[in-house]
Image (cartoon, rainbow, N blue to C red):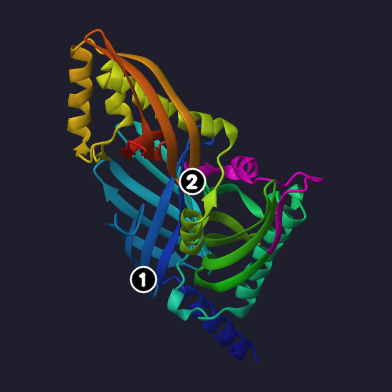
Amino acid sequence: MWNRLALIFLAASLAFAADLTGKWSGTFEELKPDGTVSRTGGAYMDLKLSGETVTGTAGPDAGGQHEIRNGKLLETKLTFEIPREQGIMKFDLIFDGESIKGSVSAASDGQSLSARVDLKRVRDASAQPADRPADRAAIRAHIDRIFHAFIHKDRAELRATHAANWLGYLEGSRKMIRGIDEYMNWAGYIEPGNSYGMTGYKMREFDMIFQGDAAFVAFVADVESSTPAGPFHRTLRITDFYTKQNGAWIQTGSDTGLHPESLAEQQQTPRTLPDAEKKHLLDAREAVWRAYFAGDRATLEKLLPEELLTMEPGGDWGNRTAVLDGSARFASGAGKLLRLEFPKTEIQIYGSTAIVYSSYVYEIEQAAKRSVNSGRVTEVFVNRNGAWVNPSWHMDAGR
């Protein structure tokens, strides 16, 4: 009986030892003399066990490997060396079947190195269940929690469903958002009692892929919201990055943006400018006219883009060069603008483009003679980087 038990324990020991063969990944922490961490880097090992002899490579990552020597595994004690130009690095480690942990020491030119490593087995992704239904269900339920947190304006729940080091982009963000605090600042109408914000959602095209304890999730969501202008529908295209921490999935990153359907709809649907933005547009319109008659080339070059195309009152076609030259001729002839009026103006806005329809009257003086000109003009303005520029117009005498 004792012989049988001995054989069982020996077989278990051999199987346990054989598990050392494979790839291992983790951290390398360089230590100060007081034992605190001075620098953290990566650690990667590719080991093979034959009897008690261990061969293979080790280094900071899979691409920076060095041959090990004198490798031994005695029960759970794993030792080996890596010769380097600066000296020999000695590894004194413990292998428990699932991890490799321990200390590293080296000496060079009278200076000593002390470090510790902690590695886990690199699992073969192809050996994992392809579908992972339990993980899929858990992540989908977690995403539903986030949507409901927005709907119910539950800030605590929204914070709890995102990792502290969250990283990514939210709808409309031009810069990268780092950390949960910046995320919460970008989250929108989620103050309790606020009548605006998300009111409902519907998922479509939902799928995900896994790599170990990480998941990449892609989906489309039709979102309903309440805004100061009334009910609002938009479609979002979202990719989320999930990691499993302490046995539970949590959103660690995301990229949220408008689906092409909603982008196209926004460009096709007329909108109304807020009063402040309307003033900026009309100020830009008047600035073009006044800069032309003042011979202000710098302002014209700022407001008139290279692709400028015009149709003048007499039917002539023009471009940026012709407009700049005409302005210079008027100013060099001592011309003056005496009066500029726009008796009627109507505006249509589509996306970042404004079409301004106006009647105009201006009075100028040239060679001591005054003249009054009037007519109609259709001007196109485009908002670029927060400023309105004027790429085209069509003028006629209005008769």
Tag of residue 48: 1
Task: Please identify the quadrant where the C terminus is shown.
Answer: top left
Q: Secondary structure at mark 1?
A: strand
Residue 152, position as x, y percentages in the image: 77, 55
Q: Is residue 115 above or below residue 134?
A: above
- What's drawn in magenta, residue-wise? 174-200
Q: Is residue 307 above or below residue 160?
A: above
Nearer to me, 51 or 138: 138
Q: Residue at x 32, y 38 (%)?
A: 396
Q: Residue at x 39, y 64 (%)?
A: 72
Task: Please identify the quadrant where the N terminus is shown.
Answer: bottom right
Residue 271, position as x, y percentages in the image: 55, 48
For the view shown, which residue lies furthest in the top direction? 368
Residue 22, position as x, y percentages in the image: 40, 71
For the view shown, which residue lies furthest in the front direction? 399
Q: Is residue 345 left or right of residue 246?
A: left
Nearer to me, 97 or 147: 147
Q: Is residue 110 above or below residue 58?
A: above
